[in-house]
Amino acid sequence: MNAPPPLTDTGAAAAAAPPALAAAHVAFAYGPLPVLRDVDLAVARGAMLALAGPNGSGKSTLLALLAGTRPAAAGTVSVAGRPIAAWERRALARTIAVVPQETRVLFPYTVAEIVLMGRAPHRPPLGLEGARDVAIAEDVMTETGIRHLASRRITELSGGERQRVAVARALAQEPEILLLDEPTAHLDVRHAIAILDLVATVNRRRGVTVVAVLHDLTSAALYFERLAFLRDGMLVADGPPAAVITEATIARVFDAEVRVDVDVEGVPVIRPRRRR
């Protein structure tokens, strides 16, 4: 496994700070079926990391372990240098926000109500939202371009609009870390680009650490500074996209024959090799 890229920061104190997220010798299994095996991963504060690999390789499970929604069977997950098990749940929810593949809502809440749900970790148990909660919700709706949808029912929205609402709800938590599980799944090209543009903007403006599971490797190379490949629950390549998106790595990870070209901006572009 390649070493993670060095932390780029102007302050010596920041450079010495623990990573935002770290997994040390992490393993996980569903019953007798091993899903993750001895995974080591560290994500610097403010970094953008994409996780990729074939279906069933353990990407979403690793994301769940990093979020603290599943406990590791072995090894340790740490957040800001502290074992995740030592975090109080509400404090963890104020630090990490998760955007799932799909936003399923059983009741026809309005967009504004959904976004306000992101303020729950900052309110007393059973407490109502205050003026600051409402102001933050309005700000993130503006930031994510959904302010005009505030009074619309979530059940009336398109997939791309729902995904923006999910990101807005996550940002309302004011997290330091944003975890996204296939945020562009089921979206058309326009909406997929819009979501990735939004995530990149949030990272740049807020300094939020981003870890996302992606299948589109060209998009991962364009938007993310680092890409980690998993196969059979193991980390098999980790580094800058230009270094790890190679024909040999794609063959090793996906058992697929592709051609990797580099565009004028130095971004790897993947094309399938057609069998004649």
Image: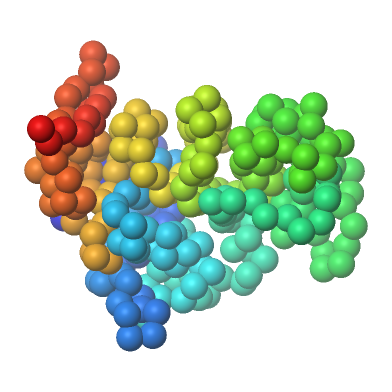
For residue 213, side relative to residue 103 (left or right): left
Residue 45: x and y, percent? 43, 46
Residue shown at the point (48%, 51%) measured from the top left: 181
Residue 108 appears anywhere in the view: yes
- In the image, 110 versus 78, the foreground residue is 110
- In the image, 259 versus 89, the foreground residue is 259
Q: Image quarter for residue 15?
A: top left
Give the residue furthest to the front: 276
For residue 232, side relative to residue 71 (left or right): left
Q: Image quarter for residue 236?
A: bottom left
Give the residue furthest to the bottom: 32
Residue 252: x and y, percent? 13, 51
Residue 167: x and y, percent? 62, 42
**Colouring of the image:** rainbow
Residue shown at the point (35%, 28%) measured from the top left: 222
Residue 170: x and y, percent? 64, 48
Does 119 sit above or below residue 70? above
Where, quadrant-wise, is the N terminus in this rendering? bottom left
Does 47 sit above or below residue 68? above
For residue 24, side relative to residue 134 (left or right): left
Residue 75 appears anywhere in the view: no
Where, quadrant-wise, is the C terminus in this rendering? top left
Residue shown at the point (31%, 38%) measured from the top left: 217
Residue shown at the point (82%, 56%) measured from the top left: 107
